[in-house]
Amino acid sequence: MSISQTSGNAPAGARAALGALRKVTASFAVILTTLLGLLVITFVVGRMVPADPVIAVIGDQADHETYERVYKEMGLDQPLYVQFATYLGNVAHLDFGQSHVTKNPVASDLARVFPATLELATLATIIGAGFGIPLGIISAVRKGTWVDHLARVVGLLGHSTPIFWLGTIVILVFYAKFGLIPGSGRLDVYNEGLVEGPTNSILVDAILAGEWEVFRDALLHVAAPALILGYAAMAYLSRMSRSFMLEQLRQEYVLTAKAKGLGQRAIVWRHAFRNIRVQLLTIVALAYCGLLDGTVLIETVFAWPGLGQYLTSALFFADMNAVLGSVLLIGIISIAINLLSDLTYRFLDPRTR
Amino acid sequence: MATRYFNDLHNWLINEEFSSTRQARLHKAYVLWLNLIANPLAFAGFVVVLMLVLIATFAPLLANHDPILQDLTMALKPPSSANWFGTDEFGRDVYSRLVYGARTTLYISILVTVIVAPIGFAIGATAGYLGGWVDTVISRVIDSFLSFPAIVLAIAVTGALGIGITNGMISVGIVFSPQLARLVRARTLVVRNELYVDAARCFGGSTPRILWRHVLPNAIQPVIVQVTLLLAAALLAEASLSFLGLGIQPPDPSWGAMLARAYQNMEIAPEQMYPPGLAILFTALAFNTLGESLRVALDPTMKRN
């Protein structure tokens, strides 16, 4: 609004472009402050740890001089804001410190474990959206019928089940009892290390290399954890898409479409669905972020060598650099996904143009 | 005698010709209660929660063993007439631990509510009522928290505060309060433009007084619903933290910790995975159904049909 007043004689196209630029700048400012908030949280958490970080590095047998030297080397004698600035600089250079357990830089550890998590979460999102969104839409269209009740029960169960427990039950029943699924990990031992690919996702790399036996094995391994996580995502997505659809079906244009004799299928898929696409995209992005959360537990249960397992084992050994690095990575990914969905939102929704 | 008293009470509550504001308020709550209980799902949820409270209260009467008494000669026994759900690897009775675990669950629920409700309300109402840069700053902070996967953040905060159930639940509370704050903020934005708020301001009401006396009562409904739903989320979070060894510490019984133990001994005594898991599932289910039904009962657009 204020743009059009200050540049009243500018051509309409330039004015629109300026407005769009302003909005994009504003959303980047939001992202930057959110990112800063995230960094403050991890920094504060790192400083609140009751364990002495110096002793964590040198052990409790070291003498006083070594302690003083390491204390200075770690910059702990500096004022807090200097420490925070150093922390920001390190993070900007992707330096999250060294892991006490693996003795590697945390950044390289993260690069090693993250593709496994990404593979699992992506597959789970596809499963969750593929089943959840149609289920939600059908239950909105057939509100009050058995489909709707079924969807509600599925949703409530999904919100109430501890997924790590579900994971162990699946292992007990389908692996231990019936032998239908392979055990833990990403591959059987004899397939280990057969494909080394550019993406680090075994599924994609196996396709690229044409190793179908490895692909089949990897798919069987990922199926159980991905289905369990996908179920959790489905519970959320079906509930949300149901309420979005219900809102659309109450609108007047639906009545108009009905009055002009349009079939229900056309109304739902050609009119109403087009209007909730953008909202659906937003909640799928949110579900994706939520799944990064769920993987922490499910990876522990299925011994999936990803970020979640790395985080929990780091926690177990009080390896705070690794913990904070993982947390920061998950936070940054969440912000990135939110940003991406926000931009797509602007692109797809004509009202925000 | 008692029936007569309850009949009179019912008539007094249902009567729409109020003789006092107190009666009017109680009438509103009573009608809501009747609506809620008429829904079979909500009734089932209510019964489960009531049972949880009763089990937690009368745990010493219901348990047939000392929940923390170890007897290594009895380790990992299958279910029997003496130990209904078997024994864990220290020979402790699983059934008794399950019963006492209800106390932990209740403790978690109360603790999280006590943390989340005041923080969420205070922050949300302040941001919504004051607006301007205060609102901008608070909203940004809320967004930073919400952009974070909840369990991961709770894990990080627990790691920092130190392992234990109270710290664990404080971190869960910190992680969950922004959700409530955002809801209260949205509601406050609506309420603050109401005429009665203007009137209160004209009469010289201070900001805290207006928030407490006028905004809170009108923003409380979404808070109640959200807190009920949060109880389920908190229970699952406690189970997750305890499963990772960050929650309740031995020897105290909690369902999440029992799951963690059962997981360690899954190959010898797989049947022990079921009791604590199902206990968590049904309790969370009850909280979620209650929350959902409350939302429907409170939603003004849902009335009349």
Image: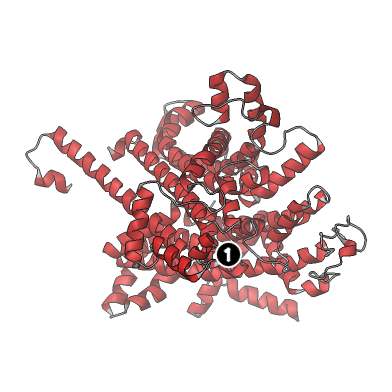
Residue in view at x 78 percent, y 34 percent: A179
Q: Is residue B280 above or below residue A179?
A: below
Residue A36, position as x, y percentages in the image: 35, 55
Whether residue A320 appears in this view of the structure is yes
Left or right: A350 in relation to A7:
right
Q: Is the residue A294 above or below the residue B45 in the image?
A: above
Query: SS at mark 1?
Result: helix
Badge 1 amino acid: Gly
In the picture as drawn, the residue positioned furthest to the top comes out as A210
Q: Nearer the viewer, residue A160 or B198?
A: A160
Location of residue B10 in the rendering, given as x and y in whole percent from the top left corner: 64, 73
The type of colouring in the image is secondary structure
Q: Quadrant of residue B297?
A: bottom right
Disc 1 designates what residue?
Answer: B168
User: Along the horizontal axis of the image, is B150 left or right of B256?
Assistant: left
Q: Is residue A21 left or right of residue B191?
A: left
Decide which of B205, B284 is in the foreground and name it: B284
Identify the chain of the residue marked 1, using the numbered disc in the image. B
Residue drawn 49% across and 49% down? Answer: A326
